[in-house]
Amino acid sequence: MASTSVRAGMLSLVFLVLFLGIWEFSTQVIAPQQGELSEYELLMGGADQEARVPPPSEIIRHAVAELSDPFYDRGSNDKGIGTQLAYSIYRVLTGFLGAMAVALPLGFLIGMSPLMYKALNPYIQVLRPISPLAWMPLALFVIQDSEQSAIFVIFICSIWPMLLNTAFGVANVRQDWVNVARTHELSPIKTAVTVILPAAAPTILTGMRISIGIAWLVIVAAEMLVGGTGIGYYVWNEWNNLDLASVIFSILMIGVVGMLLDLALGKAQTLVEYKE
């Protein structure tokens, strides 16, 4: 197993070096041939290198500069990458925790009661496919606050995977375990906490991992719409400034933070897994 991990790591590193090498050499600046340009073209900047995707070396230099002072604040349109990520993570976690507070108890209710499942399932199936961003105009009108509207969008997109996975996990707990709880005359609440919750926990954590991934995707798009602060706004603002190095750097940071959020919930999932 260790040998396989080492070889996989080395192969992954080779792929990265090849990719960066091809990218670097394919984006080199070509020296302009000024002799072929007219005097008017030279005066109008025709000799300048046309817009291009920056090479990895330029992005690495930009990343070092940004990460050396990630929390600077020089005004509303000039904040460090750390500050922008902090705003986005705060919104994601706030909406995610709100969705947890609703989805987990409701999922338990649906999973333990076939009657509630049949009563609520039509509403879930209608609301679940709606794009989270479709709620943004209504949220802005009702809440009248861009910050709270973005959190609401995270809430609405996070609730469905957690709700459905919780209901599925609870409904599929082995019946003989529940029968043992009834034999010991445990109350429904105690049965839910001591028997059903531990058994359904891996499935519930899977739903939470899906939810946090969707939430991190949606917050970037939501912040592009509402503006102000956040990593989504940072990407859009740098694009408006035609700073492609900042755009690519911020895309990489979005990926890194998303990976860390998933790893955190993945670690929590391994702690609640059980073997019969």
Image: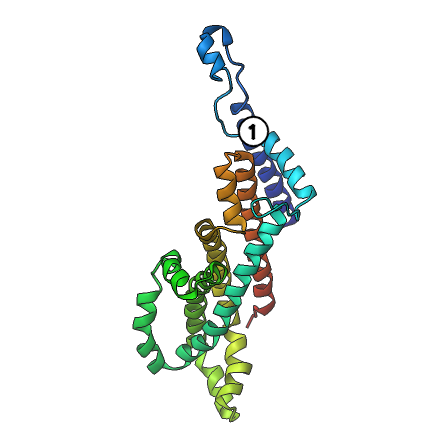
Viewer-nearest residue: 124 or 93: 93
Q: Which residue appears farthest toward the top when viewing the image?
A: 35
Viewer-nearest residue: 45 or 102: 45
Quarter containing the C terminus: bottom right
**In the rendered image, the vertical position of residue 260 relative to residue 21, given as above or below:** below
Q: Is residue 37 visible?
A: no
**In the rendered image, the vertical position of residue 143 relative to residue 65, given as above or below:** below
Instruction: Categorize mark 1 by other alpha carbons within 10 Å: few (<14), some (14-19), many (20+).
Output: some
**In the rendered image, the vertical position of residue 270 relative to residue 193, given as above or below:** above
Viewer-nearest residue: 125 or 3: 125
Q: Is residue 94 left or right of residue 3?
A: left
Q: Residue at x 56, y 70 (%)?
A: 275
So how many labels did they put on this image? Answer: 1
Query: Where is residue 162 shown, x and y percent of the image?
Result: 46, 67
Query: Where is residue 56 shown, x and y percent of the image?
Result: 58, 31
Res. 126 image quadrant = bottom left
Q: How is the image coloured?
A: rainbow
Viewer-nearest residue: 44 or 131: 44
Query: Where is residue 200 shown, x and y percent of the image?
Result: 49, 73
Query: Helix, strand, or loop for circle 1?
Result: loop
Q: Which residue appears farthest toward the bottom when viewing the image?
A: 185
Q: Which residue is mark 1?
A: 55
Q: Residue at x 43, y 62 (%)?
A: 157
Q: What amino acid is found at the position of numbered circle 1 in the picture? A: Pro
Q: Is residue 233 visible?
A: yes
Query: Where is residue 165 shown, x and y percent of the image?
Result: 44, 68
Q: Which residue appears farthest toward the right when viewing the image?
A: 68
